[in-house]
Amino acid sequence: MARARAAYVGTSVVVAVGLLAGCGGGGSSGTKSAPPWTEGSTQDGLIAAKLPAASSGRKVVSGGAPWSFTLAKADDPNVPSSQWPSADSVLTSEQLRGAIPEATSVTLGKCVKGVNGPSSTDKNASCTWSVALKGGGGYTNEIVVSIVTIGADEKVSEPWTSERNTDFSSRKSGERFFTSGSFSAKGSYYLDNNLSSVLVSDGNLAAWINLTFNGFNSLNDSRNTMLTGVFPVLAKDLADRMPRKYA
């Protein structure tokens, strides 16, 4: 989600899944004692963050059983889009209400498929949720949930990290780049244009998911609330769908 294409991602998401060579097949049994994610090397500016306090009223809500994916071909590190969750189920209305207790209604809007090589993804790759807020004056607030790609951990983590580092190198005041392990995710960050990204992984396979927030200005201390309250809870919701199982 490099800054150069951030606006495009936020308005009409097209998901490109490249054929990345050099990775074998993957399963999902895991180990019993895989450690939590931690940053492999110290990088100035990354923030070790936690979930908001219970007193905030924001809470993590289960979205269902963890995702289970497999690689269809030994020489293709991409999980077939037929295995992807539909974007409307990546986060549920209950999870959005848990993260945003100020919401008076949460409604699923438009969903679109992405591009998977020469064809479209089998399921919706991007969906928009409309959120009405108490005291919001009737203004529309939206959260766009977009699946960028799912595949072998290394082959998803490398381009995700490259994009994060590109944005990090030109970071602006108020942006947040979180350490690996924050919210149980392998990686996450939130830009000043309200585009954010979460990398979740079981240690073998990984999913790259972008969240775009439009509006929410009626929230009390809205910018800080999104950075320290809403986004952390939703990032944790995503990480819980693909918890680490492999050391």
Image: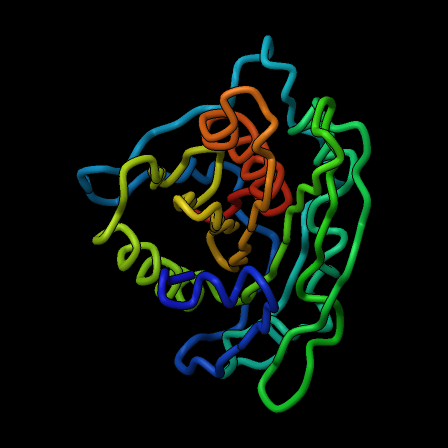
Quadrant in the rendering for residue 216: top right
Q: Specify the color scheme.
A: rainbow
Residue 196 percent location from the top left of the image? 47, 48
The image shows residue 132, relative to residue 143, as above or below, that is: above
Q: Quadrant of the N terminus?
A: bottom left
Viewer-closest of 58 and 7: 7
Residue 42 percent location from the top left of the image? 19, 40
| Residue 48 shown left or right of residue 140 in the figure | left
The image shows residue 138, relative to residue 20, as above or below, that is: above
Residue 172 percent location from the top left of the image? 27, 44
Q: Residue at x 51, y 31 (%)?
A: 226
Residue situated furthest bottom in the rendering: 118
Q: Residue at x 19, y 42 (%)?
A: 43
Q: Residue at x 78, y 34 (%)?
A: 94
| Residue 147 shown left or right of residue 196 in the figure | right
Residue 21 percent location from the top left of the image? 42, 82
Quadrant in the rendering for residue 154: bottom left
Tag count: 0
Q: Residue at x 49, y 80 (%)?
A: 18
Viewer-closest of 90 and 166: 166
